[in-house]
Amino acid sequence: MTMLSLVAPCYNEQDNVRPFAESVRRELAPLAGWLDYEIIFINDGSRDKTLPALQELVAKGADNITVLDFSRNFGKEAAIYAGLRTAAGDYIAFVDADLQQPIAVVREMLEFLEQNPEYDAACAYQETRLEGAGMSFLKRSFYRVINALCEVPLHTDASDFRVIRRPVAEAILAMPEYHRFSKGIFSWIGFNTYYRPYQAQARRAGETSWSTRQLFRYALDGIISFSTKPLRLATGLGGLLSAASLVYMVAVIVQKLLWGNDVPGYPTLVVLILLMGGIQLIVLGILGEYLARVHIETKHRPIYLQKGRYHCRRGQTPPADAETDEQNMAVTR
Ligand code: UDP
Ligand code: MG
């Protein structure tokens, strides 16, 4: 029997988790002849009733379900990592819990991988984006910038909605960095990935947890995690400015020799001082961004902390009180 693990990060998805589980059951039932599956929900510090909703699913015991309960919100990337560590399947699928990513597409990606052993992973990308023109433009610009800066190309629009084989999962787990930029990680590890378009659905309930500011931060994280080119920018800028000032110096000398000196250039001086100060601060800022990440990484803090774990197996009566698995409190990297 082939095993599929579905990893679903949940942040404030109280009204979505049950329909999600139902949708999984409905869509994967036709494959019951050769496929068994488990759902791994990660409660990423939700502030609503997501945890009780998940515990209710576990108590029903209708499916193979594991719930990892984080001690606070660690972000989707950390949730994916935790899910991956728990997943036992031959195939692992990353799916949002808000039903924007249809389970039918997971099934199609899975069937594709079954039939095409030369591919290691299948990824679905949004053909037409649901968001506004402004956001769409920002995202496209981000891909242009990051692809110009990073050695490994990022597939435009490629999301983390994908199905991977076990060796790919092992490769991702071998990257225990704290700042996790999954799009970059997926490209960096390589492997043969099949890309297919899909139509994202509207969010079933709740709202997106990404603000424009967070997206900007995320984009910056991505660039800094996967490129050191901004650091080289300082050298380039320094060289350019030195060359420019040499040219200007020659010009001033020539001017002095030919026409004498009438002490001009006060505005030029002010502009140059401000410009140089600004450039130096920008470069310092870039250095700081990298240094901050080195600082965090060297602390070797865990990527997430789990305070509880609940699980049930299909057909088995669940324990009366699905208790916390003590050994899971100690999360190592
Ligand atoms: N999510 C999470 N932790 C967070 C933010 C989001 O686990 O801090 C989950 C969320 O529950 C959803 C998925 O990540 O299943 C995608 O989030 P969202 O729908 O807010 O993003 P969008 O679809 O708008 O890009
Ligand atoms: Mg969503």
Image (cartoon, grey):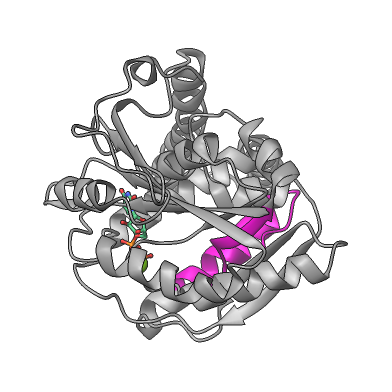
x, y (%) of residue 260? 59, 45
Query: Is residue 163 in the magenta section?
Result: yes
- Residue nearest the viewer, comparing 191 with 37: 37
x, y (%) of residue 186? 65, 50
Q: Residue at x 18, y 58 (%)?
A: 14
- Residue nearest the viewer, comparing 269 with 117: 117
> In this picture, is 102 found above or below 250?
below
Q: Residue at x 46, y 32 (%)?
A: 289
Q: Regarding ligand 1, which quadrant of the image does it lie in?
A: bottom left
Is 67 positioned to the left or the right of 299 in the image? Answer: left
Query: Magenta segment range?
Result: 138-164
Quadrant for residue 197, please give it. bottom right
Query: Is residue 300 in the magenta section?
Result: no
Q: Residue at x 43, y 68 (%)?
A: 24
> In this picture, is 195 found above or below 228?
below
x, y (%) of residue 201? 38, 81
Q: Residue at x 20, y 72 (%)?
A: 205
> In this picture, is 101 found above or below 174?
below
* Quarter containing the N terminus: bottom right
x, y (%) of residue 150? 69, 49
- Residue nearest the viewer, comparing 210 with 14: 14
Q: Can residue 9 be seen from the camera position used here?
A: yes
